[in-house]
Amino acid sequence: MHHRRQNIVQQIEETFLSCAVCLQPYDQPRALQCLHTFCEKCLGDYCKQQLSRHEGATMFPCPVCRQDITIPPNGVSGFPYNHLIASLKDAVRTNDRPDSFHSNRVLSATSERGERRPISTRASVRPSTKCSARFGKFGEKEAEFSNISGLTVHPVGDIVVADCGKNVITVMGFNGISKHSFSCKCCIRDVAISKFGTLLVTVSQSDGAILHEYTLDGRFVAQYGDKYAQENPFGIVVTSRNKAVVSGITKNRILIFNERKKQTHWFGEAGDTLEHFLFPYYVTVNSRDDVIISDSGNHRIKVNKMDGKLKFSFGSQGSKDGRMFYPMGVCVDYLDNIYVADANNYRVQMFSHKGKYLATPIKNTFAYGMDVKPISIAFSQDQLIVSLRGARFAEIQVFEWDPFIYAEPRSSLLGCCGSYNKVADSGLYHAWS
């Protein structure tokens, strides 16, 4: 029995806790902006090799996904230490002792501050919220996904998925059945719905364009912009006035476009102060059209007014409740609660409209496979829709979730008689008028 368990531990170490460069157990694991993790020494050697080919270069391609990574000013040691990987290593090593498999006791691992914190050996290995539907899988066939990078819900009740690995948009029902899909002749990232029901897609390598517009059935409508070749746009959301808010991860800024999709202004630049961003991958807006940004490289969420003025920010690097490790997708519910795909902590966290931590609806997504983490999220009619990405893993999951369990309704969302009136639309709750 012990021999079999030793084999299981060995498989876990080889599959989940080994560096993709040296194929050995992680030593000083460092996480990149693309969410992949490597040994610090392996990363240093790899960077030297890559940078030697281009004098003066400050970026290098990730060894796994080939995404361009910016080197911190203090070198590879400046990449965040992956405390979760270190904690998992501690847990596996503890479980490798013969007596550790004959008890349901709680193990402990070292947190980011050095204190000991519990890790459950059984109860925490599956997400805690009820999953009502799972669909999609990794592959190149129709209705299969390679790299889900965008997710939204159409007013007609369809889930719209952007796959940047295949540059394909797929429209699916909540039952997981694919209705249709279409290819885009450029690199795509995220997708949003305009006031008129068309799809707005952030694009690159498209003659300097930043947005493409399509009908729901895939007919090309228009492209917008011709000077954005160096922008590398990613996230997008449409406001109540049909303005488009786009995040750019090369120049680390947020761009605002009017209802005719002409840029009116932008705000932000690269840095780590409250006025700056570092890889602002995803954006959303609340009922007041405040812009909510996942400032991924700074491990925080920022809430700005439409003119760029900062209202507040919350989060810092770590694994405790309320902290984050490369946050990705963001969305809001009808109470303006904020949901964050806390990717490198393998969970989705819920915060109030003021940034107070409320709950963790989804946790421990690594249980689904190697490095499986939440990337894009959307909220629709008491359902939280999440895309999961991992090594040869791509899936969409729908979770039943009632915001009223944790949140206090905002006064601005109460009806004239003091009772809440739920918006009777698709559930995106962006207060379309």
Image (cartoon, helix red, strand yellow):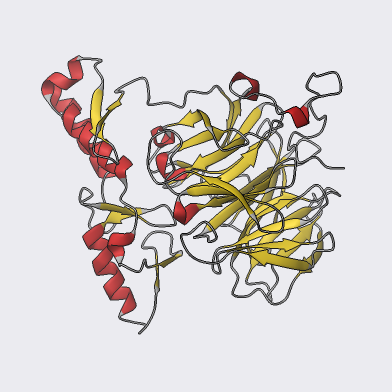
Q: Is residue 144 visible?
A: no
* Residue 16 position in % (x across, y down): 31, 42
Quadrant in which residue 125 is drawn: top left
Q: Is residue 290 visible?
A: yes
Judging depth in this view, the residue of 57 and 101 nearest the camera is 57
Count the labels in the image.
Answer: 0
Tell me if 260 is positioned left or right of 334 in this view.
right
* Residue 395 position in % (x across, y down): 54, 40
Judging depth in this view, the residue of 225 and 272 nearest the camera is 272
Q: Quadrant of the C terminus?
A: top right
Tell me if 233 is positioned left or right of 279 in this view.
right
Residue at 58 percent of width and 47 percent of height: 312
Find the residue positioned furthest to the bottom. Answer: 55
Residue at 23 percent of width and 53 percent of height: 23
* Residue 307 position in % (x across, y down): 71, 58
* Residue 428 position in % (x across, y down): 73, 38
Residue 194 vertical placement versus 372 (above, below): below
Judging depth in this view, the residue of 233 and 291 nearest the camera is 291
Tell me if 100 is positioned left or right of 82 in this view.
left
Residue at 19 percent of width and 32 percent of height: 7
Q: Quadrant of the N terminus?
A: top left
Quadrant in which residue 97 is drawn: top left
Residue 303 vertical placement versus 79 (above, below): above
Judging depth in this view, the residue of 75 and 356 nearest the camera is 356
Residue at 17 percent of width and 21 percent of height: 100
